[in-house]
Image: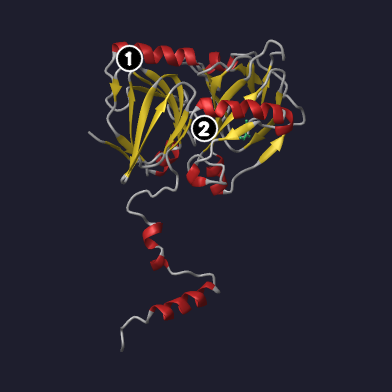
Amino acid sequence: MDMTPPPGSTRKAFYDAIRAQHMTPLWEVLHALVPQQPATPCVPAFWAYAQVRPYLMESGQLITAEEAVRRVLILENPGLQGQSAITQSLYAGLQLILPGEVAPSHRHTQSALRFVVEGKGAYTAVDGERTTMTPGDFIITPSWTWHDHGHEGTQTNGEPVVWLDGLDIPMLRFFDAGFAENHSERSQPVTKAEGTSYQRYGANMLPVRYNAPFGQTSPIFSYPYDRTREALHTLERQAPVDDWDGVKLRYVNPATGGSPMPTMATFMQRLPAGFDGKAWRQTDGAIFSVVEGHGSVTISHGAGQQVFEFGPRDHFVIPSWHTASLRSAPGCVLFSFSDRPVHQALGIHREERLS
Ligand code: GTQ
């Protein structure tokens, strides 16, 4: 029997023939399907707040929060154009609310985090409780909970409020598990005093008959910055500083010790003055929001290297398995989030700390 492979043209004819049967040869795509290491289309990207802010404010003149439902400029990864994604699994955007406005109530299966970037006077309502939004606060909207946003200031004395939205939109799209509905009222009825959740779940205690009001999602829906900031600054003075991360803490669901949401982990870190961090890489691509101070991040992948110099309210993304390191001369504070809990649940999370 002749075992010589047929010429390429015969293969091409074969591929055409099986395409009609909705089949395709694995051997042409095996390398790409099962890469030797992550080959993400996501690229490092940086949004300087000084560049972004004028457009955000201009959007405030173009459309109301009511008409837009959510007046957001999406931070779209240049490698994922048209996909409304900042990494393959995550969405990020900057949302603007002006004095007197309401972003009407709805709910969806996508989980959301809000990280407050600037301004005072806005609130988010979740499941009958409002929380005032203060810069640096980390706020959660659990999957399938009613939520609306508003601004109690007036046109004459209020200031614009901007926050970073982080959602698992691309992940739920991948799973085809997205559902949404609008509330019958513009603002949901307020049924709990502000701070109820925090007092009930945020004092290192839980109700005796704790019943997980939001399933796997944290029952604390606002983690105030003053507490986070104090913890980081105290630890910087009193405890060893990590060579890669500086002083970095992860936010927790106090009932489980796990991440605040099943799909997203959130972190806050302080780099002490003069920090010159070692490099690392990990499979979870991460989105950063600069809270205070200045510094730089160096991101390299293969032969390519980029350095972003950052200051307050700037945003950047470190894609999966890109090598990164952080520096800060005056010291700084960085918020970040990623899809790490999903990697961990699937047993595929990898991290390498380079020396
Ligand atoms: O605030 O509910 O940035 O539903 C994207 C989708 C924000 C929100 C976004 C949303 C929201």
What residue lies at 61% left-to-right and 17% top-to-bottom? 131
Mark 1 crowd level (few <14, some 14–19, many ≥20, 10 Å Cα): some
Query: Label 2 amino acid?
Result: Gln
Give residue 67's position: percent from left, percent from top: 74, 32
Instruction: Identify the residue position indicated by label 1 in the image.
Output: 236
Residue 105 vs 228, above or below: the answer is: below
Badge 2 or badge 1: first in the primary sequence: 2
What residue lies at 53% left-to-right and 30% top-to-bottom? 217
Q: Is residue 170 left or right of residue 302?
A: right
Is the residue under label 1 in contact with that under label 2 (CB below 8 Å)?
no
What residue lies at 36% left-to-right and 17% top-to-bottom? 331
Q: Quadrant of the N terminus?
A: bottom left
Q: Which mark is residue 216?
A: 2
Q: Residue 87 versus residue 131: which sits nearer the camera?
A: 87
Give residue 85's position: percent from left, percent from top: 53, 41
On the question of residue 273 being in view, the answer is: yes
Q: In which quarter of the image is the C terminus?
A: top left
> Circle 1 sits in a helix, a strand or a loop, which is it?
helix
Ligand 1 is found in the corner quadrant, namely top right
Q: Is residue 245 left or right of residue 109?
A: left
Q: Nearer the viewer, mark 2 or mark 1?
A: 1
Query: Label 1 amino acid?
Result: Glu
Give residue 281's position: percent from left, percent from top: 33, 38
Disc 1 under 8 Å from ligand 1? The reply is no
On the question of residue 147 being in view, the answer is: no
Residue 123 vs 320, above or below: the answer is: above
Q: Residue 252 versus residue 225: which sits nearer the camera?
A: 225
Q: Residue 64 versus residue 28: which sits nearer the camera?
A: 64
Hey, which quadrant is residue 188 in on the image?
A: top right
Disc 2 under 8 Å from ligand 1? The reply is no
Hey, which quadrant is residue 305 in on the image?
A: top left
